[in-house]
Amino acid sequence: MLSAAANPARHFYCNSRVAVLLPLPLAGAYDYRVGADPVAEGDVVEVPLAGRTSLGVVWGPGTSATDQAKLRTILRRLPAKPLPEALCRFVDWVAAYTLAPPGAVLKMAISVPAALEPASPIWAVRALAVPDGLKLTEARRRVLAAAAAHPPLTMADLAREAGTGDSVVKGLVEAGALEKVALAPPAPFAPPQAHRDGPALSESQAQAAASLAEIAGFHVWLLDGVTGSGKTEVYFEAVAAALKRGRQVLVLLPEIALSAQWLGRFRSRFGVEPAVWHSELSDAKRRATWRAVADGTASVVVGARSALFLPFPDLGLIVVDEEHDGAFKQEDGVCYHARDMAVVRARIGACPVILASATPSLETLANVQAGRYLRLHLPDRHAGAVLPDIGVIDLRRTPPPRGFWLAPPLVAAIERTLAEGEQAMLFLNRRGYAPLTLCRKCGHRLQCPHCTAWLVEHRQAGRLICHHCGHATRLPPVCPECEAEDSFAACGPGIERIAEEATHRFPGARVAMMASDTVAGPHAAAEFVRQVADHEIDLLVGTQIVAKGYHFPMLTLVGVVDADLGLEGGDLRAGERTFQLLSQVAGRAGRAERPGRVLLQTFQPDHPVMRALVAGDRDSFIAAEAECRRDAGMPPFARLAALVVSGPDAGAVDDYARRLARAAPHTEGLEVIGPAPAPMAILRGRHRRRFLIKAARTVALQAALKEWLAACPAKQPLRVQVDIDPYSFV
Ligand code: ADP
Ligand code: ZN
């Protein structure tokens, strides 16, 4: 073993065996023999695998007992920088916690294979001595003069500079008067200007910012402040402090693709755009960003949860904004919660992490109470703006007319708002026109052929769509059950139906919809948000994506069409989540000089969630909710895991689930509930049975599950999905 002078912590291996982790769902790393070139931990290599080749990462010394002679040899080391040690440890940690195969986690860390190869050069040209006998036209003279006066330019730039066409430049290259040279690609991200002044902070903001800016080692902060209190401005100070120390910063946002306003604020604070990381980046951008993170030229990355797996060599701060948001939980493949894993990543990297929210999760509040996390509080909206006044509309007493969804008091409030020249927003967390279509003659309901779910009518698109698998179809000409014609009735509203009603009720108003399927991509979303901010829209109808942190100064009224919607289904966090979502929606109202008002349409005005919202009493609500969870032995006071067994054949799934049940662990403090059909009993054509495992915080849950599953391996096409700390109970 040699050690490298540049990085004494890295172990180099030559003439020996090493463990190479492959980005595949295998049980662990495989041993390979080191070839002529020594390799070190974290190096990305190419190795032979079952008649093909695969990328892999050198994970440590070899561990198997296989004969050295039988080992395959590493083919080559890729020119990419080795994965930082902190990232490798993070991959191991996430795999151990989620029970995902380590290779499946590694796959997220090397998600851009093209970024591991050398960057393709950009070709430029520079002037050589003019060859004898070259015919010099006026255009050629100008090109040669321009080439002599500049560092190498691309052919197109040089032609532009000289005011000629590309063909003149090409001709000079062929004649040997210009030479092609490869340029290194430019650093794609300009450094943020950490020394620029931010806005003058209020006293409580300044105190919070000072606490955050001071800390360098591992600490978890909860930045707890009402909507509009300036949490973003405050954590920008911590970002500036980390940048001044020369470190990198990661900011996780729940809907980064829709966060144009956030990017604008970053630009006005730091003078440049940060690097952005989400699933809708182009390949070229993705490659450039991955490399820039690895070589440290991207100093601030704002991203979705997958940004946690970027190869930061020197991460100095992580911010998780809207930390309570369910979008941080990944539900398929490797099931992980990005907020919790951000804390792990920060601990491994010995850097602080800031969790920001106006409605922190019970998990985070429990950690504050236990003294593990530190809380900073911003009690008031900035610049004297007051929190909106929240009231309920009791749908039992003042229902909307038949076939409509907006109750008279809400209609009246919207009319007043529009008459004042202000904006209103109607919120309903349901896409499409109607969630259910049924036959008026026989009662038949149109269902997805692959899932236990109704088809949702999307009238604008002329389709019925399954929101679980994406199956789309047209409305059938006759009822498939009784063959009646023209018998379908749309039941219940989605936002398309609310927008239709609003257009009809408020004929002079400019009405627009915003949902994930009505705005196509980040640019369309940014343009839409600009239109609302510039008051080109009077009445906005939207799903939860309109709740995400936007600041619309003229928006003074928020109407929640169905405040009870999230309370159905009895899932563990239904109350907490509804409270968080409605608080966040309410937080869009009255953010500037004009005070805001929020009206919640509900059949349950006495429900604890509605009472807490009306009274503005988050803390008592959370305390009561926490009490219930403690009594029920539920998270955050105990741990939960879900196992979902699935397969195409219901009988085989049941058989396997029963076998699994017989092998269930009998451990003190651990309770196995099930198997039972999952609420979504069929999803994408697979039958699903679910176990819930409840464990005291003292039980080694992962070890117990691992042993259990190892005793009863699932054979294809059966699958077991493990979800530690599940959030979705479908
Ligand atoms: P939060 O993230 O808590 O909802 P924001 O950081 O978005 O709050 O702040 C709400 C609004 O108030 C934003 O437009 C922000 O620019 C403005 N703001 C907050 N603090 C200040 C400050 N100290 N000076 C000037 N503007 C501020
Ligand atoms: Zn479906």
Image (cartoon, rainbow, N blue to C red):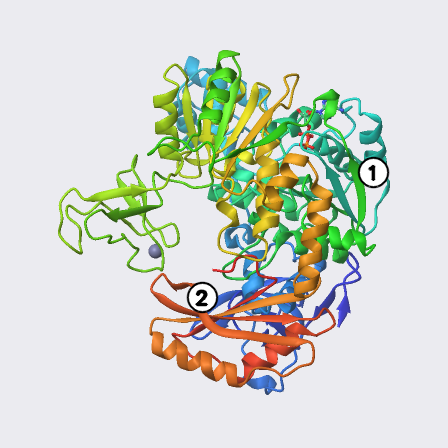
Circle 2 residue: 678
Disc 1, disc 2: CB below 8 Å?
no
Q: Is residue 649 left or right of residue 666?
A: left
Is the residue marked by circle 2 packed among few (<14), some (14-19), or many (20+) residues within 10 Å?
Answer: many
Is the residue marked by circle 1 packed among few (<14), some (14-19), or many (20+) residues within 10 Å?
Answer: some
Quarter of image, res 243: top right
Cα distance between the residues tagged 1 and 2: 47 Å
Q: Is residue 188 left or right of residue 562?
A: right
Quarter of image, res 670: bottom right
Quarter of the render that holds ligand 2: bottom left
Q: Is residue 397 left or right of residue 490?
A: right
Q: Residue furthest front?
A: 397
Discs 1/2, front: 2
Q: Amino acid at mark 1?
A: Ala
Q: Tell me, yes or no, if residue 468 can be seen here.
A: yes
Q: Check residue 213 in the rendering and tell me which mark sits there, or answer none.
A: 1
Compare residues 180 and 13 and report the one nearer the observer.
Answer: 13
Q: Position of residue 413 (x, y in %)?
A: 51, 21
Compare residues 289 and 351 and report the one nearer the observer.
Answer: 351
**Residue at 47% over, 84% down:** 659
Helix, strand or loop at label 1? It is helix
Q: Is residue 262 left or right of residue 402?
A: right
Helix, strand or loop at label 2? It is strand
Q: Position of residue 498 (x, y in %)?
A: 39, 32
Q: Is residue 697 above or below residue 565?
A: below
Name the N-terminal-most of marks 1 and 2. Answer: 1
Q: Is residue 265 above or below residue 702?
A: above
Q: Amino acid at mark 2?
A: Ala
**Residue at 75% over, 54% down:** 366
Q: Position of residue 352 (x, y in %)?
A: 78, 48
Q: Is residue 167 above or below residue 431?
A: above
Q: Position of residue 20 (x, y in %)?
A: 60, 70
